[in-house]
Amino acid sequence: MRERPLGALFLDLNSYFASVEQQEDPNLQGKPVAVAPLYADTTMVIAASYEAKAFGVKCGTMVRDARRMCPDITIVSGRPPLYVSYHKRVLEVLEDVLHIEEVHSIDEMRFKLMGDERVPENARRIALKMKKAIADHVGPCLTSSIGIAPNPFLAKVATEIEKPNGLVTLTAKDLPHALYGLKLTDFAGLNYRMKARLNGCGIFTSKDLCGAQRHELHRAFGSIIGERWWYLLRGFDLPYAATRRKSLGHSHILPPELRTEDGCRDVLLRLLQKASARLRSEGLRTSSMTVFVSGFKRSWECRIKLPPTQDTITLTEWFYKEWPNHDYEQPRGVGVTFHDLRLQDEFTPSLFDNLADRTLLNRAVDKVNQKFGKNSIYLASLDKVKDRAGEKIAFNKTWLFQEGKDDNVWPTPTRWMP
C-alpha cells in the first residue's frame, strides 16, 4: 500500500478560557483558576487551568466541589466577548504563518499542508513558528497542542496524545500503533454513549478499534460512518461531509434571585427574544421549539409544534399557552431550543395570518436596535431581565451574536496595536 504523506496540521489551544483569564491578570498566572458562568456554588465549571486540573477540577465540576478539591482555586465569571477578541487575534497571527483551512471552534483550527510543507521536519518548523507567534503577539499564557498527520482526523487525534503544549507528528509508518495508548473517548466523535455501543460489539480499546474490519465498524457504528472511520484511521484524506444547522437555542443558569416562578418565566421570554432575533439574522424559521427548566429536585421540558415562524410575538404566544403546565422544583437554569429549521424560501406562508405585518414589525425592531444599541426597543414583559442571559460560547461557536450596536464588543488590548 502506497504510503500516505502528511497533509494536515491541527491546533488546539490548551484550557483556552482559563488561559485567557491568566493572560489578562498576571496575579492568576501559575495558579489554579476555574471559569464559571456566574459566581455561585451551584453552577458548573466551564474551563479549568492546568494548575486546577492537577487537583481533579475539570469542565462540568460543580463550583462548590471545585472549592473543596482545591481550596486555593480562583473562580472567575466567564467573559465571552473577551474570549472572542483573543480568538480573532490568534487567527490573525496564525494566518501570517500558514493559511487557515477551517476554524472548528473558538480554540481549534486546522491547516492544510502542501508541497514541501509535508516534509516532517518542515511541518514541525511551521508548528513551532505558530507557537512562537501566539506567545509573542497574543500572550505566553496561551499554549497549544499541535498534531500533524496524513489527514485532519488523525491530526486532531494527535493533539490528545501530548498535553499541554504538545507537538506530535503521526506519519503513515507510525500507524496504527501510535494510537494504542489513547482511550476510545480521545477520538473526536466518540462520546460515552458511542463508547458503550462499541463495547457491545467487542471494541474496548483503541487497538480493537484500529484492528476492526470495515464491516465490523459498519455494524458497530450502525451506518456507513463506521466504514469512513476505517479509512480515516489508516490515513486516507476523505472530504468533509457538509452539514446543515439542525437547531438553534440559548440557555441560562439562573442567579439565586431569579430562581422563582416569575424569574424562570421572564428569563425564558428573554431567551425567546434573543433566539428569534438570531433566526431572523440567519434567514431561518422554526417549526418546533423546546422550552425547559432544569431543577435541583425536578426538571420540566415541553416540546411545542408550531407553524413556521421567526416572529418573537408568535413564539411568545405559543410559550404562554404551555407555561401554565410547567412542573419543576427548585429551578437552576432555563433554556429554549428551536428545531426543524428551514430557510425562508423553503416554505409557503399561510394566506390567513398576519405574517407580512409581523415581518415588517420585526424588521423595524431589529433595525432600530442595530442602529441605536441593544434593547433600544424590547417587549415590555422583558423590562426586568432585558440585560440578562448574555451571549455564550457554545460548542463549535466562534462568534457572538450582536443584538444591537456595540453589543458583545471587547476593546482591543493596547499591546496588540502595531
Image: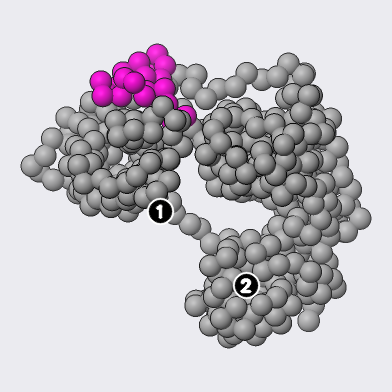
Find disc 1 in the rendering and name its residue: 246
Between 322 and 372, the residue placed more toward the observer is: 322
Question: Magenta segment: does it hold 377?
Answer: yes
Compared with 169, 33 (above or below) is above
Between 377 and 380, the residue placed more toward the observer is: 380
Label 2: which secondary element: helix
Report whether 74 appears left or right of 318. Answer: right
Instruction: Report crowding for label 2: few under 14, some 14 to 19, many 20 or more residues within 10 A (C-alpha).
Output: many
Q: Is residue 100 visible?
A: no
How far across and how far down the image is residue 337, in percent? 37, 46
Between 332 and 143, the residue placed more toward the observer is: 332
Residue in view at x 51 percent, y 36 percent: 392
How far across and how far down the image is residue 15, in percent? 71, 42
Instruction: Report crowding for label 1: few under 14, some 14 to 19, many 20 or more residues within 10 A (C-alpha).
Output: few
Find the magenta span and give its range. Answer: 370-390
Q: Residue furthest left?
A: 352
Cα gap from disc 1 to disc 2, whole angstroms: 23 Å
Q: Amino acid at mark 2?
A: Trp
